[in-house]
Amino acid sequence: MPRAKDVANYLLSLSIPNTPRAITPLKLQKLVYYSQGWHMALNNGEPLFNDEILAWEHGPVVSELYYDYKHYGYLTITPKNFNNMTKKNRKIFSKKQLEILKAVWDSYGEYDGKYLEELTHQEEPWLTTHRNEIIKKQKIKLYFNRLISKEL
């Protein structure tokens, strides 16, 4: 199973500096959260990664990613090359997972981190979780399942 760090690395490979599609630490956190939510909704509740997402003041956060990228502050994170193979020559993401990640990027990638923060602040998983607590995967799954139901 991929890790949140793998999701972040893939998303960073799509970043385009000096455009609305550049990724800051705040934006990265929200994109990783939306990747988890949409993956769960489209895969019978199966998480994309097992890392916990916390309800921090500025929205959903994977703490490991926060500490990896906090030195960028509000600046754009340097894009990365992404290789979908592990050291053991196995694929990190399936074709379907990559399609979902690309769809998340296509849907949310043009927005800045503050806009995505405000969006998450209007959504049930963050709203109904105490600050600094884990946002339960079940809560994320139910919320994104409801979003899909509204679209159909």
Image: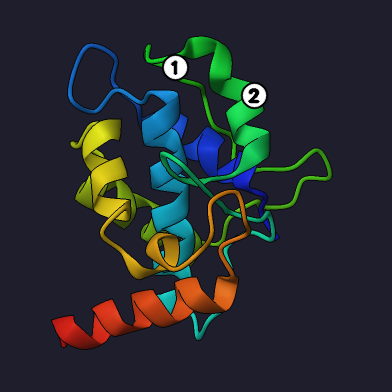
Q: Quadrant of residue 63?
A: top right
Q: Where is residue 51 in the image (x, y as percent from the top left)?
A: 68, 54
Residue name at image x 46 percent, y 13 percent: 73
Residue that label 2 marks: 68
Q: In which quarter of the image is residue 144?
A: bottom left
Eyeballing the image, is 105 above or below 25?
Answer: below
Q: In this view, does 146 lie to the left or right of 100?
A: left
Looking at the image, which residue sits at the far right? 88
Query: Quick one: SS at disc 2?
Result: helix
Q: In this view, does 134 lie to the left or right of 143?
A: right
Residue name at image x 84 percent, y 45 percent: 88
Distance (Cα) linking label 1 and label 2: 11 Å
Eyeballing the image, is 90 above or below 43?
Answer: above
The residue closer to the viewer here, 44 or 150, is 150
Crowd class of label 1 (few under 14; some 14 to 19; many from 20; radius 10 Å): many
| N-term-proximal mark, 1 vs 2 | 2
Q: How many labels does the image show?
A: 2
Residue name at image x 59 percent, y 70 percent: 136
Residue name at image x 32 percent, y 53 percent: 120
Mark 1 against mark 2, which lies toward the viewer?
Answer: 2
* Kind of residue sitting beneath label 1: Ile
Residue that label 1 marks: 77
Q: Position of residue 48 (x, y in %)?
A: 57, 63
Eyeballing the image, is 29 above or below 67?
Answer: below
